Amino acid sequence: MAKRLTIMGATGSVGRSALSVVAHANASEDEPAFVVEALSANTDADGLANLAIKHGARCAAIADPAKYAELKERLAGTGIAAMAGSDALIELAQTPVDRVVAAIVGIAGLQSTYSAVAAGNSVALANKESMVCAGPLLKQLSRKTGAAIVPTDSEHNAMFQVLERPEDVERLILTASGGPFLDTPLSKLAHVTPDEACAHPNWSMGRKISVDSATFMNKALELIEAAYLFEFPEDRIDVLVHPQSIIHSLVAYRDGSTLAQLGTPDMQTPIAHALSWPDRRTQTSVKRLNLLDFQQLSFLPVDHERFPAIGLARQALAEGPSASVIMNCANEVAVAAFLAGQCRFSDISLIVEKALGLDIAQASRAGEELSLSDVIALDQEGRHRCVELIAGLGARSRS
Ligand code: NAD
Ligand code: MG
């Protein structure tokens, strides 16, 4: 039986990779392996309509209601239903399918990820920010509804593939490429441009996650993601810089074995695994790994002076779930400001650090169990405060 898929964030980097996996898998089997039920996007009605038509979706939803007329017109006569608005995205996420691909960027993906899990839909989770902001809540909900959360971020998918006996795991080891500024002199780091920050050496990705990779915030968010996803203590999760991005992460067991997952750096592999799981039938067109192509694989410790993000993530995890919400929203606001030319690259970590020290985070830290509305409220308040912090930095550079 073909697996029915809904892809939230279909027009993005992960969304398009997922659709490429689906198209290749269907072309390489006698019977289609996947059927695309529904696709969503934020504002690109034309791009969404093209993908819906190309992949034979039953329905397409655009988050921006102002784009509804354009989407409806582009889909006229195709038989594909057009929907719009945030409620439409929730409805798509709740409609029964075999897997919902959560590929929206940022906390904007939380509501649909939550709705999918609440409705019992298993989720291929690329949207790490939803696990960072609501990890304990999503894990609890998934246990209640039985909806699996299948790790799709490449590192977490790698660990998931080699995580045989969680109770016998000693350490999780997250690998990091190091991003484009691993060797950039510290004096230059403050002045790098958005385009330089988005030029990742190994992966082609959306702009927000590309900046996150350059600041190490991506790895910091992934550390929190791993701690919540695998319900594993932060002090037993290591971060290892591995510039070739061939080993996607490792799991060390108490008997002395360390298991790793390897592959060329291409999101189609973890996506194919997450779509197929629990089997691994999906054939991809990904370039096969040949270790003879590499003179050597190298490994380095994290330079915490250059990249304070990992330390901030450990601090946030120690403080409790609301600190992770603040860390995420401060980073989202700061990255948007950096991409818009309103702050410097080095200000991103500074804003996150300052935001973690604000009283908003502290006020709700005691004995907390955050509900979805608590997370959304904290995120909103955090955003307002971070906009003020950025305005303060602007005043600094003018004075
Ligand atoms: P992207 O910017 O390329 O795409 C984002 C998608 O989300 C688009 O389809 C966009 O229309 C949609 N979207 C954005 N804002 C929205 C909103 N407010 N409401 C509804 N939809 C909205 O991002 P990406 O690089 O594909 O990353 C997506 C997610 O996957 C992120 O959480 C990222 O951290 C994670 N991830 C990405 C990669 C990668 O290789 N790109 C790898 C691992 C994890
Ligand atoms: Mg990753």
Image (cartoon, helix red, strand yellow):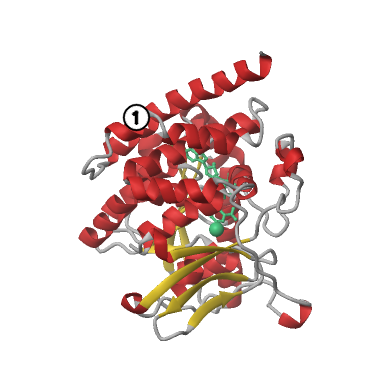
From the viewer's perspective, is residue 185 above or below residue 124?
above
- Left or right, 5 with respect to 396, comes to left
* Number of numbered discs visible in the structure rendering: 1
- Left or right, 75 with respect to 381, comes to right
Q: Quadrant of ligand 2?
A: bottom right
Dot 1 alpha-carbon crowd within 10 angstroms: few under 14, some 14 to 19, many 20 or more: some
Q: Residue 257 in the image: state x and y as whole percent.
A: 47, 84
Element under disc 1: helix
- Left or right, 378 with respect to 257, comes to left
Q: Residue 371 in the image: state x and y as whole percent.
A: 25, 42
Is 397 in front, or is 374?
397
From the viewer's perspective, is residue 55 above or below residue 111?
below
Write the residue at 74% across / 76% down. Answer: 296
Is 251 in front, or is 35?
251
Write the residue at 61% across / 45% down. Answer: 215
User: In the displayed image of the protein, which residue is found farthest to the front?
Assistant: 305
Q: Label 1 belongs to which residue?
A: 360
Residue type, label 1: Ile
Quadrant where the N terminus sits is bottom left
Is 220 in front, or is 281?
220
Q: Residue 36 in the image: state x and y as whole percent.
A: 48, 59
Write the residue at 35% across / 37% down. Answer: 87
Residue 91 visible? The answer is: no
- Left or right, 155 with respect to 47, comes to left
